[in-house]
Image (spheres, helix red, strand yellow):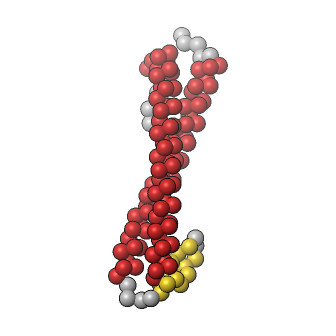
Amino acid sequence: MLTVTWEDQERINKFSRLHAALADVEEEMQVRRTEREELEDLGLEIELLDDDTVLYRIGEAYIHMAREEATAQMELDTERANADIARLKASVEDCEAQMKELKVALYAKFGSNINLER
């Protein structure tokens, strides 16, 4: 019979927290990727418009903007989305690295008596 020490329980708890955080970060990254794709589509639509003003969404509201201003805002929003994606990707890699270390330690002690797979 295996004895679960306080350190083992701490590792299990940390793995669980990292797993939950990883799921949240991956979900947020998917939202940002979708936003980036929508912004890219918006850029194409703005180029095809003949109007001098366009409706641009800021938060939950749409406002009238000059086409050049909307293009500049779209580029800024795209850069922001790309920066967020890069930050989230680094966070995913960090979580996965920590989880890998914890898996090695926990599987070494508990073997098939513990399941740490997604």
On screen, residue 68 above or below 8: below
Q: Position of residue 104 (x, y in %)?
A: 46, 22
Residue at the image position 59 percent from the left and 20 percent from the top: 8
Determine if residue 27 is in view: no
Examine the image and state in which quarter residue 47 appears: bottom left
Q: Position of residue 26 (x, y in %)?
A: 48, 48
Q: Residue at x 44, y 32 (%)?
A: 117
Q: Position of residue 91 (x, y in %)?
A: 51, 43
Residue 51 location, x and y as percent?
A: 42, 89
Quadrant of the frame with the N terminus: top right
Position above or below: 33 against 9: below
The residue drawn where x is 50% and y is 15% is 109
Where is 115 relative to 22, above or below? above
Q: How many marks?
A: 0
Identify the residue at the far top of this view: 1
Name the quadrant of the C terminus: top left
Residue toward you, 85 or 117: 85
Q: Which residue of the protein is positioned furthest toward the bottom in this rendering?
A: 51
Residue 40 visible? The answer is: yes
Q: Residue at x 43, y 20 (%)?
A: 112
Using the image, determine if residue 25 lies above or below residue 61.
above
Judge from the rendering whether residue 105 lies leftward or rightward of residue 41; answer left or right.
right
